[in-house]
Amino acid sequence: MTKIIDLPDTSYVLPGNRACAGCGIGIGLRQITAALEGQMVMTVPASCLTVFGGMYPISSVEVPWVNVAFPSTAAAATGLAAGLRATGKADKMTVLAMAGDGGTGDIGIQALSGAAERNEDFIYLCYDNEAYMNTGTQRSGLTPSGARTTTTWAGKRENPKDLPAIMEAHNVPYVASTSAVFPEDVYDKVVKARAIHGLRYIHMNTPCPSGWSFDPKDTVRLGKMAVDAGIVVLYEAAAGEFRLTGRSKTLAKAGLQATVADYVATQGRFKGMTAETIADVQAWVDARWARYLVRDAG
Ligand SMILES: Cc1ncc(C[n+]2csc(CCOP(=O)(O)OP(=O)(O)O)c2C)c(N)n1
Ligand code: SF4
Ligand SMILES: [Mg+2]
């Protein structure tokens, strides 16, 4: 595993973009573009990520980038991959489709599922800030239970969709779950995915100070707490071989170091969450964590 001190200094993400202070997306995007050494073309639907892309001719990201309509990210990536093959550039350049949780788990899932079934040759990276943030925080299928959004005023009632599991069910060659606040874990997974052909899916948790309602200085602390509580789990399934990675691997031996109650207390979006809902979410997290431990043990 790459140590944080050994991550490359080269950055394709310039300072001075218009994302909110403390946005988790920027931390992840730096590692993703560095892992691909800028040898890439991105396709991105409407989302907070387009804020980093900026408005022509001003951009904070130094790689080719195609903005596309909401449901069509994976379809556009399919076309870009075909274009690279036709022009003999497929070995040098990687197509990166990158979209939010709403754009992936709800609106773009049809094109993504089709591309996965055909095993198209690109990396699809879903950054998960757990709601439709760019339009002011509406609930998505990946918003956690108990979270208040502008469309779930009393707190969402359902647990989030398990998108990496849905992608694993497509039998694609690589599926991973990571968090932007573990840059070395993001970096290693993108490096690994780059060397594989076919559809590679990476799910990246990205804390969002504005939508989750916490102080921007706490992005990394909260992101790490989500992993320590087993709410976000770092793992990969390469050719069907499952393993926990990084901090989650450590926690498999040491035990989880935080609870759902600890985690929800840190964010305004969970204000008013009842003890009963917290207990329900804890039971859901515990059952899921137990399944990961069984898979990791092989
Ligand atoms: C077809 C369509 N419907 C709605 C919108 C409005 N819209 C733009 S960004 C956005 C939120 C996207 O949410 P997500 O994919 O989770 O990315 P995030 O904004 O959270 O980064 C919405 C609803 C749009 N641009 N196009
Ligand atoms: S709303 Fe959230 S995800 Fe969007 S730019 Fe701000 S911090 Fe980042
Ligand atoms: Mg989102």
Image: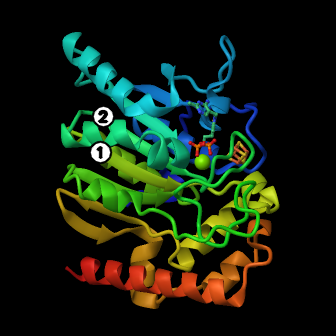
- Residue 181 drawn at (x, y percent): 58, 59
Per the image, the residue denoted by label 2 is 122
- Mark 2: few/some/many CA within 10 Å (<14, 14-19, 20+): many
What secondary structure is marked by label 1? strand
Give 128 or 4, whichever is nearer the viewer: 128
Labels 1 and 2 touching (C-beta < 8 A) = yes
Question: Spatial distance from mark 1 to mark 2, Cα to Cα?
Answer: 6 Å
Question: Relative to residue 211, is residue 58 depicted above or below?
Answer: above
- Image point (69%, 83%), residue name: 262
- Residue 276 drawn at (x, y percent): 65, 89
Three-letter amino acid code at the position of disc 1: Arg
Dividing the image into four equal quarters, which quarter contains ligand 2?
A: top right
Question: Is any part of residue 56 visible from this angle?
Answer: yes
- Residue 8 lies left or right of residue 130; in this view the side is left
Give 203 or 40, whichever is nearer the viewer: 203
What secondary structure is marked by label 2? loop
